[in-house]
Image (cartoon, rainbow, N blue to C red):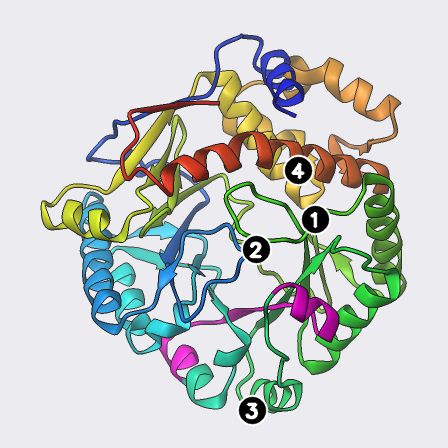
Amino acid sequence: MSVITDLTRMWLTRTVKPFEFKNEYDQNLPFAECDGLGLYVHIPFCKSICNFCPYCKVKYSEDICNKYIDALIREIHIVGSQYEGKKTVTSLYFGGGTPALAVDRIGEIISALEEHFIITEGIGLELHPDNVNVEVLNVLKNAGVTKISIGIQSFGDKYQKILGRKKVDTESMAKALSQVPFETVSMDLIFALPEQTYNDLKNDIDEAFSLGANHVAIYPFIDFTFTKSPVKAMPKKQKRKLLDDITKYCYSKGYSRNSIWTFSRDKAEYSSMTRENFLGFGCSATTLLRDQFKINTFDVEEYCKRIAENKLPTSLTIRFIKRQRMIYWLFWTAYSTRVDERDFEKFFGVSLKKMYGFELFIAKLLGFVKEKSGIYEMTLKGAFYYHYYENFYTLSYIDKMWGIMRNEAFPEKIEL
């Protein structure tokens, strides 16, 4: 797998130089001139740890959670106060973990952010199904949350057991969602589970929309090496057919495809990923700026210590060469299934065709993309192979990095 990603990286960046992450960072972050800046906040606490989940999370403790939130708010002020006045940003997303375990302090975190930022496109927050009740939803709505994403994974008994999840109380969930409406109600589902059929996934999608969702995300199961999940990934051909068939089904229902994995109705949107630049706050949160990408430590205790010293909790930083930044931009922009060459030229000051004309020609020749008026849109075939390559990327790069950072608070260096 690493051979494929290494060769692709060398070809697209036109250098053998790896992605080099070093134990260094800038205390003052150059975000002032970044357009389309987004915000992300990570709350790492969970009541129980799902064996398939790769994200940074720890067992919930009220005392540790409150100490962490205090540090998080301080990090927000350390970064936000670097900008004179209020910086306009697009969106704010809370991920985890289970952010609702800190539901009574979400409003406090949002208030801290609003001291420094003007949020123009809403606030999203991830929820565990157990947290979808009228009391929690009202607290979140009153705090300013406009979008929620519920981690269902599957409504089917078989897959809930495989994933170590308990049965979702769909009746109470639907009732709560009808009483406390949000701009976007997204439900996360997992596809490519063992022996999962088209009807299994179709039924999950139908149930999600019937319960009050106007947006669904069907994320592929990825077998990270550092998780304890016994679940094995689905074979390539079977996975491609399932993704193609379910995409066609969603189109037949009139749903819009917002990204490789997401479908919606009524133009609902929920994505914390497809942004040109963003600031991340909290353990494991990442920050992407014009010329650098940084990752906060995964260690809650070390995170709090760094903040207490009035230092940013950055564990690793990569300082991009130009082609590396272009590849990062293209990779995550393509997540939305379309790339506009005008956006690329606006961001980098150079033509997309000049930099990657040959690769675009090959992509069109192979039937991965179609181009009209400078906009490149993925075909079904292209979307699958994007997924297929992203799986290699995840296992070669993210798996390695997260595996190390789960065990070392501040590694000296990681090369990918």
Determine which quarter of the picture holds residue 363: top right
Residue position for label 3: 179
Residue position for label 2: 52
Q: Earlier in the sequence, mark 2 or mark 3?
A: 2
- For image coordinates 74% across by 56% down, the residue present is 193
Q: Quadrant of the N terminus?
A: top right
Query: Horizontal placement of 169 versus 409: left or right?
Result: right
Decide: is 290 above or below 13. below
Residue position for label 4: 391
- For image coordinates 31% across by 37% down, the residue present is 408
Instruction: Mark 4 vs mark 3: give the one in front.
Output: 4
Kind of residue indicated by mark 1: Lys
- For image coordinates 35% across by 40% down, the residue present is 407
Q: Distance between the residues labelled 3 and 1?
A: 39 Å
Q: How far apart are marks 1 and 4 (CA)?
A: 14 Å
Q: Earlier in the sequence, mark 1 or mark 4?
A: 1
- Provide the secondary structure element on which disc 2 rests: loop
- Provide the secondary structure element on which disc 1 rests: loop
Q: How far apart are marks 2 and 3 (CA)?
A: 32 Å
Kind of residue indicated by mark 2: Phe
